[in-house]
Image (cartoon, coloured by chain):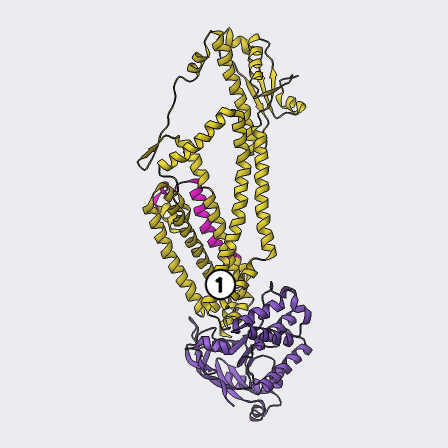
Chain colours: A purple, B yellow
Amino acid sequence: MGTVLEVKELSKKYPKKKEFAVDKISFSVNEGEIFALIGPNGAGKTTTIRMISTLIQATEGDAIVAGHSIIKEPDKVRENITYLPDEAGAYKTMTGDGYLNFMAGLFAKDQETLDKYVERGKAICGLGDRLNEKIGGYSRGMIRKLLLARAVMTEPKLAIMDEATSGLDVINALEIRKMIKALAKEQNMSFLLSSHNMLEIEYVSDRVGIITGGKLMVVGKIDELKERYQAANLEEVFERVVKDHEVR
Amino acid sequence: MKFGNLLKKELRELITVQALISMIFTMVLLIIMGQIMGGAMEEGFDTSSITLCNQDDSEFTAELLEKVDSSESTDINYVELQSDDYASEMERLGIKNLVIIPQGYGESIIEKHEPAPIKFVSIFQSGGIASSISNISASDIISEIETVCTDEVLLKTYGLSDEEISLVREPMQTVEYTVNNGRIAEISASALGAIYMMQSMIAPFAIFFLLLMASQMIMTAISTEKIDKTLETLLSAPVSRMSVLGAKMLAAVITALLNALFMIVGFVFYIVGMMGSAVNEITINAGPETIDVAASEVTNMGQAMAELGLALTPMSYVLFAFQLFLTIAIGLSVSLILGAMATDVKSVQTLTIPIMVAVMIPFFITMFTDVNSMSAGFRAVVYAIPFTHTYTALTNLMNGNMLMYWIGLAYQIIFFVVCMFLAVRIFTTDKLFTMSFSSGQGKKGRKKQAEVPAE
């Protein structure tokens, strides 16, 4: 099993801030693996994800995505990833179909590939005829489904998702979790997730990394962590790790 | 392919059905306004009817009015007044203007050899252009009465021939010359000024709207993407940031040009509608002979402007077009910087203000005064605004003031390079996501914004 993402002592310090927002964190994500970054608000999750997505520059360290450095080859990195930000929107004046076509056009090298991506996106989002309507008239849940479909339709090596199911009802959220698991298992797609929803992470992830105060405190399989911290569930593991950090 | 895809998306975002309707509506509105204004002015110029009350029973006045009547240019409606309360009399008669020849007018001129008054009463009509034109037209009637009075009645009474009357009327002929930059042409300075102003009126109007529209579009395009978080999705796709930036700027330019086209077409029709009727009226009243003279005067005017070096050459147009493009590019790059700072809709509105002020100040100043006639301090401030040089460019090119033109252009190029450098720097670094300007949120709102990057 190859490594899709190798994060090496990645750090970020914002100007005029004393503390590092992310401080020398290292972890890896394997092919077909679902890896989740969890942590309290302001822990550094989004900053880490934004650095890996090449949206912001790392102060120190590097991350290798599908063999390409985020520092030296950001263009190549972007060809191999998709990023779904938390509370992201879509272009309201476009139809759902138009949006999938536009986004597929940014990834596809020819028309045939573009059509394939769009068909895949249409099937995944399950919005049917409503894809012909303007996104401005969509509900929050519909937009999220469309964005999720967009994030996986291009078959990226690594799909990065910040709060993947935010805004979705229980049934839709469950569908999405199942879809992520299926894509990882059947198509060997890797996922880097970030979420506050411990139940979701516990259900969907293979491994988790708990980040707090910009530092990655612990990385491991959920069962191993539960055993190590003698916790009944991931929520308890999370609580103990965060408290340990605060004590230190 | 990717750039085309991005450009198509940006154009779709900017040129919506609503935007097109608004462009067409503005154009139609301007055309209608021109027609309304033209109609109002035509009404004002309409000298075919004048209300007159003759209170004088002298032979002289009767002969005078007979002559005025026979001139065919005036249709006099005679009325009788029941009192000296002109306001209520005019209301009773339903008239807007009234010329009164008082009793003793003829006697005063013929026997006493004293000037006699002719009264002119008009109702104030909201001070609009049409009402003032109407007053001017009525005053023309009085001067016509005066001419007939002297030419036809008085001078002929004293036995002068038509030639002698012409000599008395015009004992000399004024030939006016105007000098510009050492060149001289046979033309009246005031007539030249009027034509010059008309020619240089459309360009600042176009610059004003082009700049405001292009700036607002790019600001909205950037800020909306940032606020809706579509920008993060877009920039994590395999497209270069420069392509995204370029597509946005090009789409804003195309849309602004389209907007300006509709606006200018509307504005031209507005001017034609407003001025056309007035010009027609003047020439019709002047008679066929004067029409020929007017046409030749227009040709002479063009010739005189060329002689004075005030006519624009094809090269001047090229230089002006280049400067216009540079101006839009400056507006876009500044808007790009401001748009990147927006965090919400309110802040977008606030951030638009600096651009609006920078566009409006030189627009109004150059419209009403010559920047060079201002004090050194004010001049420095006004010339520091890069858009001033575009407003003054056409005048500089027409006057052959090339040094000022090149200085202005050089300043704009430097300004653009600096702004574009900053814009590209913002767009290609973390600043795009970390820069923020929150409006009206207070400390709490700003604190919340500041927390975002540390997530």
- Pointer 1 chain: B
Whether the magenta-drawn stretch holds residue B372 is answered as yes
For the stretch drawn in magenta, what is the main secondary structure?
helix
Q: Looking at this rendering, what residue extends furthest in the left direction?
A: B182
Q: Residue at x 41, y 32 (%)?
A: B300
- Residue A15 quadrant: bottom left
B387 to B340, vertically: above or below: above
Give the crowd class for mark 1: few <14, some 14-19, many >=20 residues within 10 Å. many
Left or right: residue B390 compared with residue A239: left
The residue closer to the viewer here, A147 or A213, is A147
Residue A121, picture quadrant = bottom right
Rendering coords of residue A125 (x, y %)? 64, 75
Image coordinates for residue B368, horizontal then vertical, percent: 44, 40
Would you place residue B295 above or below residue B444 in this image?
Answer: above
Residue B309 in view, yes or no: yes
- Return the x and y of residue B376 as percentages of the image width and height: 34, 45
Q: Which residues are magenta?
A: B349-376
Res B345 seen here: no
Residue under the point 43% across and 43% down: B365
Residue bearing the label numbered 1 = B247
Residue A94 position within the rendered picture, expressed as x and y whole percent measured from the top left: 60, 64
Amino acid of disc 1: Ala
Count of labels in the image? 1
Tell me the SS state at disc 1. Answer: helix
Q: Is residue B315 magenta?
A: no
Query: With respect to residue B272, does A4 lie above or below?
Result: below
- Residue B226 versus residue B32: which sits nearer the camera? B32
Q: Nearer the viewer, residue B212 or B255?
A: B255
Front residue of B274 and B61:
B274
